[in-house]
Amino acid sequence: MRQGYGKRLLAVVLAGTLAATLAACNKKEEVKAEKTDIAVTFNQIKLGEHTDLKANLKFLTHKTDVVDTLFKDYVSEFQKMYPNINIEYEGITNYADDITTRLTTGDWGDICMIPTTVDKNELKNYFVNLGTMDELSKEYTMLSNYSYKDNVYGIPSMGNTQGIVYNKAVFEKAGVKEIPKTPEEFLSALQKIKDNTDAIPLYTNFAAGWTMTAWDAYIDACATGQADFAHEGRVKGKNPFADRGDQTGPYAVYNLLYEAVSKGLTEEDPTTTDWEGSKARLNKGEIACMALGSWSIVQMKDAAENGNDVAYMPFPITVNGKQYTSVSADYNYGINCNSSEDNQLAAMLYIKWLIDKSGFEMSQGGVPVKVNAEMPEFLKAFDKVGLLYDVPVPKGEETLGNDVNNESELGINVSGAMAKSVVEAAIEGQPSMKELADQWNEKWTAAQEKSGITH
């Protein structure tokens, strides 16, 4: 879902082939200064207005599983209000890679889910400015991922909490009576599952590639209890991947994976994992758990007949006696800045309808993006867990995280490279987890220094 082969590719391709396309979008920004490409901002759009608008929209999506079902129903419902706006969905299986390439053409459609490969300072080259952070944040949360210089270019389709999707029946059969709260407890539970059941304790889904980025999502707020750790502690901090010695922090997350693999608590051959097949296998109890965001819950429940056995637990790290989970944006809706004004307006209306009326986030195990929205039922298991939302990056430092991540080539939240290297090292028995962390810190420090960060 979040696979990508590096943000640099986008910049390189664009630099050589897209001068005209970028100039067109940049010209709009220059003429209209800090305003949107069309006359209204996203927060000014009201459903029920512009009902005579005519448009034909193409919508590129990663959600290939519901293009011909749920999304068709959405279009039908939307057209009861806007009969002259037609929407054609195109599902893309290898989304993160393919959309990165498609963006370089400028002619990719009208709406897409913005890939993580787009740097913040490039957003205006592809997407409509939807309004200011100050105004939109009065109605919507989790806007910082695709905002730049107080302008917002993407609206989250939903939020994700971070944890472990698991089969309750397998854990109970293994004799695990309480949800693990530390890496040590979690590894102990996996061992009990291995000893007392036929289930694979922890399924990595290594072969899928993009699934490995889930581990990156735990290393900040979940592992530290600090809402601003991603920027202040990791991007700007000294040696953020070092072992803290207390089963917290980024090291503890990756070390949990290292230990699970080295102890034989994962699938026998990670190179042969099967993402689609794993959903039903977890549902049926052939797999005990997987490290995935809350978006995975519904897919696992619907995969076979044992949906009631599928549950979600916080990631097993405790900071000063309390567990935390981050609540962060899933894919964001973005509107093509090259589309006609009518199509841009129609796209805004449809996105507004999806967020306000469709119930998409609830149907997909997500968290609503509207301010003060009611939390979903599955989060009741998190009632004693601290929910930490993304914290906006200080002005003037919006691209710092991307710059350090790109320069280090660690691919955090982009490629899953770190988690992949953990699995490979644990299988081979070398390098050790400490040696991996030292290598990461060395690359990270060099990247920080090149970006002007000193300690």
Image: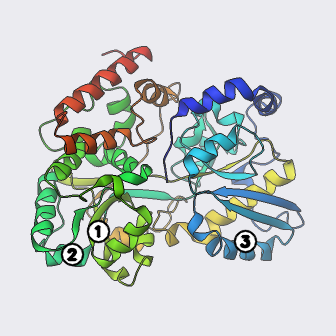
Q: CA distance from mark 3 to mark 1?
A: 33 Å
Q: Is residue 47 left or right of residue 432?
A: right
Could you say whether the residue bearing mark 1 is in a helix, strand or loop?
A: strand
Q: Residue furthest bottom?
A: 305
Left or right, residue 202 beside residue 114: left
Q: Residue at x 72, y 71 (%)?
A: 75
Quadrant in which the C terminus appears: top left
Q: Residue at x 27, y 76 (%)?
A: 285
Query: Which amino acid lies under the numbered mark 1 shown in the image of this protein?
Result: Tyr
Against 12, is 310 above or below? Answer: below
Gap between marks 2 and 3 measured at Cα: 39 Å
Percent x, y for residue 178?
14, 69
Callout 1 touching callout 2 (CB < 8 Å): yes
User: Disc 3 marks which amino acid?
Assistant: Val
Residue 440 visible in this rendered orientation of the protein = yes
Left/right of residue 2 with respect to residue 135 in the rendered view = left
User: What residue is shown with label 2?
Assistant: 170
Nearest-to-viewer mark from 3 and 1? 1
Q: Residues within 10 Å of mark 3 (few under 14, many from 20)?
A: some
What residue is at 27 percent from the left and 55 percent from the top? 269
